[in-house]
Image (tube, rainbow, N blue to C red):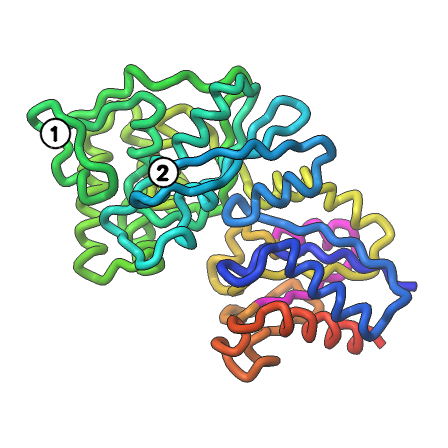
């Protein structure tokens, strides 16, 4: 009997990590019904982070909350309280790109994320784990910080409008009213290493994903640069820190608040007990919606593969599309290849995930 650990990330916007794991397992069982399959859905701080903690940590509790969505419409969501008093808050679930249609790159904001953080603080949590990724906005985290007590003011002393567009009017930043961190601090779950500004920054790299064309990217960049220049001098160096550009610059705002950067996928892997699940395994299957150049920078599949390699277990990759060489993987399957195209794969992701699981099982012999 073969023991297989199935630990995919979500296939963004098409399948949750839990659904992806279940589909891969179903496909494998259709070929090799007697094998031992262990499902460990993963996340890297983006979409699915709450689900990973809620489903894998015994005693984890979902705390429902209604927050402002990334523009105006309210969002029914939750944060997760862990037994040790740690709160997990996911930006994708409060201010995420999948919550907005059409996209509004200049006006989307992170206020809902701040409201969920505030709710966790009101509950008296000991520590915060803040999942970044999948954001709709490029506001530098200013809306979230506003909820937490910061002021971003124009030259008349009035608060600037929420969103990146409002930062063009920014004249003064006052962080003296920010709520303190919880006793155990706040850790940013994210594996993006981009700085706030420049050719590898939030606007240039992630602006197109949020619906920004070339002209809008220039505006996003200029407004984020204005924010960085007007922050207290001691905090300005955070603009160049790895991860400051995460979630439209929300990484920068959280670093300014006092949060520290952490490895999203690595922390989630620890929480879901992935290392323990690898004991005695013969194969690991991991995956994500798109495996590309960014995947090598600590995304869930590469973290899973590294842990499996340390345990002496080969890893197979399944992704909707594979556009970078999947080095370090014993096998790889692209759903777009199975389905005859990316659109077909995205239309029925679970069907093709199941087909991928079956293909890997047949290759096992």
Q: Position of residue 19 (x, y in %)?
A: 65, 58
Q: Badge 1: few (under 14), some or many (20 or more) residues near its Cα, within 10 Å? A: some
**Secondary structure at numbered mark 1:** loop
**Label placed on residue 119:** none
Question: Which residue is denoted by mark 1 in the rendering?
Answer: 154
Q: Badge 2: few (under 14), some or many (20 or more) residues near its Cα, within 10 Å? A: many
Residue 309 lies in the magenta stretch: yes
**Label placed on residue 68:** 2
Task: Tell me: 219 left or right of 302.
Answer: left
The image shows residue 63, relative to residue 72, as above or below, that is above
Q: CA distance from mark 1 to mark 2?
A: 23 Å
Task: Tell me: 155 left or right of 120.
Answer: left
Q: Position of residue 80 (x, y in %)?
A: 58, 33
Q: Residue at x 55, y 84 (%)?
A: 340
**Secondary structure at numbered mark 2:** strand
In front: mark 1 or mark 2? 2
Q: Please state the extent of the stretch shown in magenta in the rendering.
A: 303-319
Residue placed most toward the observer, 211 or 64:
64
Q: Residue furthest bottom?
A: 340
In which quarter of the view is residue 21 placed? bottom right
Q: Residue furthest left?
A: 156
The mark nearer the N terminus, 1 or 2, is 2
Q: Residue at x 40, y 30 (%)?
A: 115
Q: Position of residue 117 (x, y in %)?
A: 45, 29
> From the image, which quarter does the N terminus lie in?
bottom right
Task: Tell me: 362 left or right of 167.
Answer: right
> From the image, which quarter does the C terminus lie in?
bottom right
């Amino acid at each position: 009997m073969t023991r297989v650990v199935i630990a995919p990330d979500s296939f963004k916007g098409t399948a949750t990590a839990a659904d992806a794991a279940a589909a891969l397992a179903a496909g494998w069982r259709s070929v090799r019904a007697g094998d031992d399959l262990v499902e460990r859905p993963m996340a890297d701080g983006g979409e699915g982070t709450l689900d990973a903690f809620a489903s894998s940590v015994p005693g984890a509790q979902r705390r429902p909350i209604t927050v402002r969505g990334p523009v105006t419409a309210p969002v029914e969501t939750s944060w997760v309280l862990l037994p040790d008093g740690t709160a997990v808050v996911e930006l994708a679930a409060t201010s995420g790109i999948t919550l907005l249609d059409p996209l509004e790159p200049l006006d989307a904001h992170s206020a809902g994320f701040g409201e969920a953080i505030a709710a966790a603080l009101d509950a008296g949590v000991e520590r915060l784990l803040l999942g970044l990724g999948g954001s709709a906005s490029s506001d530098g985290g200013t809306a979230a910080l506003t909820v937490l007590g910061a002021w971003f003011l124009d030259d008349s002393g009035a608060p600037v409008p929420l969103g990146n567009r409002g930062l063009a009017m920014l004249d003064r930043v006052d962080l003296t009213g920010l709520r303190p961190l919880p006793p155990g601090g706040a850790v940013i779950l994210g594996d993006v290493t981009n700085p706030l500004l420049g050719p590898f920054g939030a606007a240039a790299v992630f602006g197109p994903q949020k619906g920004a064309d070339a002209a809008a990217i220039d505006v996003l960049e200029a407004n984020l640069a204005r924010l960085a220049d007007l922050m207290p001098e001691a905090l300005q160096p955070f603009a160049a820190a790895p991860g400051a550009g995460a979630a439209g610059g929300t990484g920068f705002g959280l670093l300014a608040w006092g949060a520290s950067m952490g490895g999203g996928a690595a922390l989630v892997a620890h929480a879901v007990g992935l290392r323990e699940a690898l004991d005695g395994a013969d194969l690991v299957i991991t995956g994500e919606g798109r495996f590309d150049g960014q995947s090598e920078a600590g995304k869930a599949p590469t973290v899973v593969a590294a842990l499996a390699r340390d345990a002496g277990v080969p890893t197979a990759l399944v992704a909707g599309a594979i556009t970078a060489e999947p080095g370090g993987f014993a096998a790889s399957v692209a759903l777009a290849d199975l389905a005859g195209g990316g659109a077909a794969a995205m239309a029925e992701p679970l069907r093709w995930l199941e087909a991928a699981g079956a293909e890997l099982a047949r290759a096992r012999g």
